[in-house]
Image: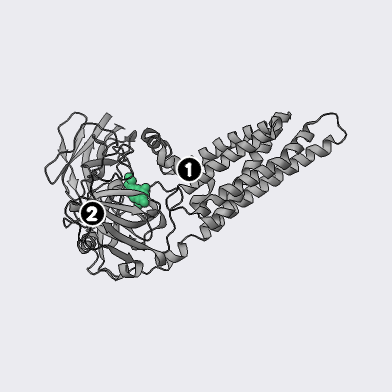
Amino acid sequence: MKLPLRAALAGVAAAAVALGLAEIVAVFTGPDSSPLYAVGGVVVDNVPPPVKDFGIAVFGTHDKTALIIGTGVLLALYAALVGFAALRSRLMAYLGIGIFAAIGVTAALTRHDAGLAAALPSLVAGVAAGLALHILVPIARRSAETGSEANFDARRRFLVGLGSAAGVALAGGFGGRFLTNSRAVTAARDAVVLPQPSGPAPVVPPGAQAPGATAYVTPNREFYRIDTALYPPQIDPATWQLRIHGMVRNPITLTWAQLLERPMVQRYVTLACVSNEVGGDLIGNALWLGTSLKDLLDEADPLPGADQAVARSRDGWTCGSPTELLRDGRDALLAIGMNGQPLPVEHGFPARLVVPGLYGYVSACKWITEIELTRFADFDAYWVPRGWSAQGPIKTESRIDTPREGASRPAGEIVVAGVAWAQHRGISRVEVQVDDQPWAAATLAPAMSDDTWVQWSYQWAGTAGDHRLRVRATDKTGQVQTEQEAPPAPDGATGWHTVSLSVG
Ligand SMILES: Nc1nc2c(c(=O)[nH]1)N[C@H]1C(S)=C(S)[C@@H](COP(=O)(O)O)O[C@H]1N2
Ligand SMILES: [Mo]
C-alpha cells in the first residue's frame, strides 16, 4: 500500500477515535452536544426545503439515520484529506483538525439552550484527533518505507495502530450511545401513572373498522413520527414545567404535579402531517389523554390582539396556532397519554399539544415547555421562514388502502376501501370512480367524531381488464375534495388518490 493511502487511513482512524471519545463525553453533556448530532441538527435546521422533502421522500422516517450516516461519510472523506495533508505539513493537518473541532463546537453551542459544557465533546474530539494523528502518521510513514529490515515490524505496528483506533472508536461510539440510552427517561416514563379521565372513555363503534382499510386506531409503535429532533429530548417529568406567557394578563407556570391534578379527558383525534403526499401514510389516529388547552389559555387570559399561540419545545422547535381556534371549544389538548400509555418519548413525553383540524407543524408541539401568546405579525414559527404557510388547516382528503397500486384481482366482487379525513369539519360523503364511469357513493363507517378520519368501503363488481380507481371526499361544510394537484408545500398536498389494477 502506498504512503498517501496509509496517511489517509491514519486520518480516518484519528477521526474515528475522536468521534468515539466525543460520544463518551456527550453522555455527560447531553446527546445534542455530540459533534455528529450537533452538526446533524444544524443541517436539519438549515437544509433547503426541497432537500428536506427529498430526504423524507427517499428515506421516509429513516431520514435521520440517513443524515447521520451522510455526515459520517463526509467526515471520513475530510479526515482522509487531513491525514494526507499531514504528510506534507503537520501544521496544515492540525489546522484541519482545528477547523473540524471549531465546526463541532459552534454547532453544539448554538443548539437551543446549550450551556458552555456543550463545547466539551468537540474540544475533546479535536485534541484526541490531533494526538492520534501525531502517533499514527509517523507509524504510517515508517510502514511504507521499502527495503528496510524492520519493514515487516513497521507494517505490523501500523495495523495495530489502526486496530486500536477502531477499537477505541467502536467502544466509545457504542458505549457512549449505550450509556446515553440508559440515562434516557425510560424509567421515569415507566413510573408515570396516568390519571383517570373525568368522563367515560369514548367507545369506538363496532362498525368503525372497514374491512381492508388501515386500522381505525393506530397503535403507538406504528404511529408516524415527524420531527426535527435527531435524538428525542429526554425530559424528566419531575423537572418539567410549562410556562404560558407573553401577551397574557396572568402568566402561568404549570408543573407536572399540577398538570396531573387538572381535569383530564380522553379523545380520539387524527393527527396529520402537512408533508403527507396524496395517498401517503403520514397520518394516524390515537386516543389522547389530556387537559383542556382552552381552559389553560382562559386562565392565562390572552390580551386582545394576541392572535397567535406559539408553542415551544425543549429543543427550541416552535409552532404557531391561531389563538381563537384553540379557544373555540374544540378538543385542543395538552396531552400526556396516547392509547392508554404515557406519551412515547418519540411522540413528545411528557406532554404535547393535540389540536383537531390543524396540521402537526402548526399545532402538535411535542416535548412542550412553553406557550407564548403573540401576534402572527410579530413571530414566525419554525417552518414559516422555511417556506411553509403560517396557517395550516387540514385539507379534506381521502385515500384508497385496498386494492394497492398495481394489484391484480380475479373478476367479481372486489372490496375497495380506505380512509377519508377533514378533521373538525367531518366527512359527509366519499365517492369512488371506476375508470371514467360516474362517481358512486361509498359506504361510510361510523366515526367517533368529526375529529377523526372515517373509513369507507365500496363493493365493486370488477370486470376483466385494466382499471383505474379514484376516490374523493366531501366534508360536512359541503366542500368537495379538489382534483387540483398540489405538492405538500406550502400548506398541504391536494389531488385525488388514484390506484391502477388489473382484473381477470
Ligand atoms: N418539538 C417538536 N414537535 C413537533 C415537531 C417537531 O419537529 N418538533 N413536528 C411536528 C409535526 S410536523 C408533526 S406532523 C407532528 C407529528 O407528531 P408525531 O411524530 O407524534 O406523529 O408533530 C409536530 N410536533
Ligand atoms: Mo408534519
Q: Is residue 8 visible?
A: no
Q: Residue at x 45, y 42 (%)?
A: 42
**Foreground: 28 or 489?**
28
Left or right: 8 in relation to 304: right
Quarter placement of the C terminus: top left
Check disc 2 and report its element: helix, strand or loop. Answer: helix
Left or right: 435 in relation to 154: left
Quadrant in the rendering for residue 178: bottom right
Left or right: 37 in relation to 175: left
Nearer to us of marks 2 and 1 is 1
Task: Report crowding for label 2: few under 14, some 14 to 19, many 20 or more residues within 10 A (C-alpha).
Answer: some
Q: Mark 2 and mark 1: span between their CA atoms?
A: 42 Å
Tag 2: amino acid: Ala
State how the image is colored.
one colour
Specify the label residue 212 is tagged with: none
Quadrant in the rendering for residue 98: top right
Some atom of ligand 1 lies within 8 Å of the CB belonging to the residue at label 1 = no
Q: Position of residue 308 (x, y in %)?
A: 23, 50
Judging by the rendered image, the residue that carries numbered circle 1 is 40
Judging by the rendered image, the residue that carries numbered circle 2 is 208
Whichever of callouts 2 and 1 sits on the residue coming sooner in the sequence is 1
Tag 1: amino acid: Gly
In this view, 257 is above or below 287: below
Check disc 1 and report its element: helix, strand or loop. Answer: helix
In this view, 311 is above or below 144: below
Q: Position of residue 65 (x, y in %)?
A: 48, 43
Left or right: 141 in relation to 453: right
**Foreground: 167 or 138?**
138
Q: Position of residue 102 (x, y in %)?
A: 55, 42
**Foreground: 187 or 140?**
140
